[in-house]
Amino acid sequence: MLGIIAGGDFSLEGMEVADKRVMETPFGEPSDHFTIGRLGHREMVLLLRHGPQRIPPHRINHRANIYALKKLEVTEIIGVNSVGSLREELPPGRIVIPHDYLSPWGILTFYEHHVVHITPSLDAGLRERLIRAAKEAGAAFVQEGVYIQTIGPRLETKAEVAMLRNFGHVVGMTMAHEATLCQEVGVAYASICSVDNYCHGIIDAPLTEEEIFQRGRENAATVNKILIRVMEEME
Ligand code: HPA
């Protein structure tokens, strides 16, 4: 079964809801219930990572979220992740399908008590399907990019952005945790990043969280088109 983890109050157009499941895990409570349903003939499950109470990014219980999805027999997960752009030539409104990530601090793991070293990477097969779907959906997208994860909840300083732009293309607060934990439990993971703003200081204009949320809501239509195309391809 395919899982989708998205932010805000994202909804998937055309999804027929069959069930809403509350899950318990050894890691505590997941962000929200799990909406199980179908799109076309495909069974899928949707989780909103910030839940109804709008959990801030640094407080999301990613381990509970991924553990519960694995228990629901999800074998692959598409993350829908809001990001800021580190490049002038990558404006808000674009989609990025990242090929790698940078997140060397605050690494989460399921392996607290025995030694397991995964070698992190995003799932190549799922990325290929996202790229094909984005092309077919006619989305303005970039098929590569390095995602840098910061801890949040505050945005980055201009000095931090000046440093980070030497190492990546977009910045967010969630994807690396999800990708790492999925890989640790053998669930394929890839991401559709919605560029919702220029990072602080990239352009000469003030940056507010309201602008980020607003752009995220606008980009949801493009993300929906890509996801629907992915599901159609699975039929
Ligand atoms: N920085 C970090 N996370 C984000 C941003 C940003 O500018 N935009 C959306 N998520």
Image (cartoon, helix red, strand yellow):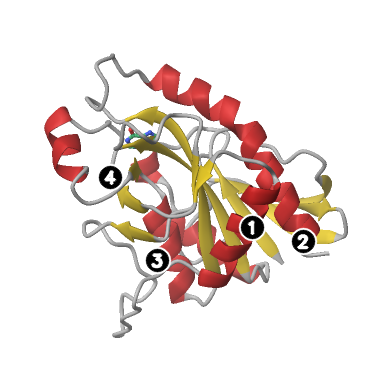
Query: Residue under circle 4?
Result: 151
What type is the residue that disc 2 sits on? Glu
**Drawn side of residue 82 relative to residue 68, left or right:** left
Q: Secondary structure at mark 1?
A: helix
Distance between mark 1 and mark 3 Cα atoms: 24 Å
Q: Nearer the viewer, mark 1 or mark 4?
A: 1
Earlier sequence position, callout 3 versus callout 4: 4
What type is the residue that disc 1 sits on? Arg
Earlier sequence position, callout 1 versus callout 4: 1
Q: Nearer the viewer, mark 1 or mark 2?
A: 1
**Drawn side of residue 207 relative to residue 219, left or right:** left
Distance between mark 4 and mark 2 Cα atoms: 35 Å
Q: Are marks 2 and 3 in contact (CB under 8 Å)?
A: no
Query: Residue under circle 1?
Result: 132
- Residues 212 and 35: in front is 212
Query: Residue under circle 2?
Result: 233
What type is the residue that disc 3 sits on? Thr
Give the residue at x 43% y 25%.
212
